[in-house]
Amino acid sequence: MKFDKYEWTAISIMVLLFILVGFIQGWSVSLVILNMCIISAIMTMGVNISWGYAGVINFGVMGFLAMGGLAAVLVSYPPVKEAWHVGGSGLGISFILLVALVTVVYFITKLVEKKSHKYWLNGLVIFFGLIIIRYFFLNATDRIEEVDPALAGFLGGANLPIIFSWVVGGLFAGGVAFVIGKVALGLRSDYLAIVTLGISEIVVSVLKHEEWLSRGVKNVIGLKRPVPYEINLQTSDWFINMVMWFNSSKLNQIIDADQKQEILNKLIIDSSSLFVKLNYTILFFTVMIVIYYFANKAQISPWGRMMRAIRDNEVSANAMGKDIVKQHLIIFVIGAAIVGVAGAMLVTLDGLFTPSSYRPLRFTFIIWIMVIVGGSGNNLGAIFGGFVIWFAWIEVAPLTTFLINLFTSGLDPQNAIRLHLLDSVPYFRYLLMGMVLLLILRYRPKGIIPEKVRHS
Amino acid sequence: MVDFINSIVVLLNFVIVPGLSYGSQLALGALGVTFVYAILRFANFAHGELMSFGAMITILFTWFFQSQNIGLGILPTALIALPFGILATIVLGLLSDKFVFKYYRKQKSVPVVLAMVSIGVMFVINAIVRIIIGPGDKKFLDGQKFIIKARQFKEITGLNEGLALKSSQVITILITIALLTFTFWFLQKTKTGKSMRAFSDNEDLALLSGINPDRVVFITWLIVGTLACVAGTLYGLDKSYQPIIYLNLVLPIFASAIVGGIGSPFGAVVGGYVIAFSEIMVTYAYKKFFKYLLPENLEPSSLVQLLSTDYKFAVSFTILVIVLLIRPSGIFRGKVL
């Protein structure tokens, strides 16, 4: 991984910004932003792989993130035994019936020759099949949802460490992407954008309303953490010793024992929350570096070259004997799987799963702005885009408040316009995002760190 | 016989009238999307926000007129404010074209880039709308709310079931009919309309025969602005105005346009009604309907609902996916005006 001067500048500006925030708003704020930046960067790498490498558009980011989040719940939550007891068999039967239905449809598609017959037969089989399955399924799910609705009301998970869910989330998202890709990848790019956007809405609405699976809008809270809890840290000796060691010079100046103890307690509480965030940062950063390493390797490999060839000229790549449909499907699935990993990490960081928080504006379009601003086709660019845009997304609010106060300082503090503007501070970030996207597309269409063209 | 009429009234009240008004709103929106697609050749993600902007301006003028005590009596004041909203929406459309879209059109950028650009425009308009009017729920329907209330209907006809007819629904349907008639007359009969159809069919040929592309684009934004503002305002009148709704409305609108055959105005209208009716019919509980039709011992015990109303939104995309799989060019073979 060799960076040129320009890239080093970009990286150092970013580092400086975080240090600046650390000094002005506190290190805790800085680390919170950094963690989300890293997760955003992983999402952008996922999008970048399908869009930047192969030109396959993926507007279903939100849906894949939600699948990752679901994986986090299903992996880490303890199983609700009673729910399995009352509803497990019903679910099993409906699953077997579903498999049977899919097999029947598959054989009808294979065996029946005439196209119109095929559609009618398939339609009929699916219609009646679904009615039968619904009967068993609704019975089972109703019973599951009745089990202790205030606390459970769903099947629960596998009670494994949540860190496994990062892989499982990738698999879930990749699986969904495989189905979507099979269905939709033949479409023209702008149709594909709309279709993936629509399907991601379907995925989220399923997660919102299938309470037996994801607890739906009742949300899942209190997921296990991969890192220690603050409260345990505050009582463990090694941590207290470490805090004392770090702040020894400061503590030694204070002679009064009571005061010293008081300050030490405060330091311990502060540093325990910092320590937890730092642990997350280290974990996420490792994942990001691993993905970045492999993404880069893939890009310069023969496979990556083939992908670029397909992106730049489908017809001639096809003429060279490349299977475009298959390669598009592969890269769509890989990209979605990386987004799924990011989704699982997002839920891990929050410790809760709220399906209604998945909105396309926040989780699809912003990610795309990150990719385009950063530079599609360049992994470092994608990461940089994720960092810059998320940083801006968070820091715009205090900045606009400051600016509005500055410009309206001549006005009466109770002035209606001033108050109205201060109320609408959160929406200025949308304005900024739109403007940034438009400006970049106009004056630097390849992004801040553009793709490197290799002549080899 | 009475049972049969009762069941029909149930259907009318809960499926057909709401379907017609929602379908009209979708149809107007989809028509706008189709115009942009056929003439400017890109998928305009900002269309929903254009509708929202138009509705917002209409609301602001409605409030102004209400404060001046200007009104239409039983009709909503929004109807006087509508022309101002339309004007503002057209201006916004033209401005976005001049400062944003024109550059890419001259560059002959690929449609995907233009779609991305429209997302940028979407963000900007979204922010402007929210900064001006705020994210909250705004009601601006005044005048007489119902033409027939359910109870009045029962008293007049002596039936068990009532049919409530909201004035916003009737206004929606009437305005839609008028606007659609005008648009189709314009496209088929006037010289400008014909030049637009020629332009969308084959740009180079149209240019060769002396059609001024700037004029075609200008007229397109006039039509798109009008359609967007009317659709947005009618939706706001019928339900209620909330900026976030219009963002969610973009997808059903796209679905309508694509299902009907994107680029085909007639298809867009049909697609709008198809999507609206399927959304409502699939999620409606038919229990009451069957209660009147079937003999007592066959009465259904469950709700007879195909999908729960939670999935209302998902229905339109499912139809979209099915149509794209079976007939990618839509019901009416799109691409040309």
Image: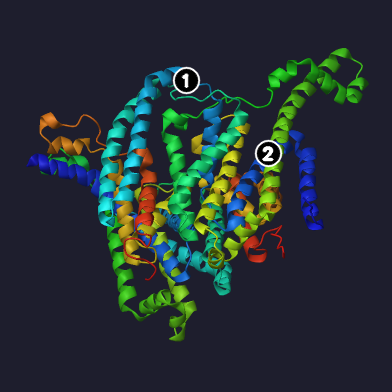
Residue contact between numbered discs 1 and 2, judged by CB atoms under 8 Å = no
Residue A50 position, x and y percent, is 58, 53
Residue B259 position, x and y percent, is 35, 57
State how far apart marks 1 and 2 are (Cα). Answer: 31 Å
Q: Residue furthest left?
A: B1
Residue B242 position, x and y percent, is 45, 47
Q: Residue at x 47, y 74 (%)?
A: B218
Q: Which residue is mark 1?
A: A80
Nearer to us in this view, B213 or B76: B213
Q: Residue furthest top?
A: A258
User: Is residue B10 shown to the viewer in this render?
Assistant: yes
Residue A28 position, x and y percent, is 73, 33
Label 2, secondary structure: give it.
helix
Q: Residue at x 76, y 41 (%)?
A: A21
Q: Subunit of mark 2?
A: A
Q: Which residue is mark 2?
A: A287
Residue A330 lies left or right of residue B328; in this view the side is: right
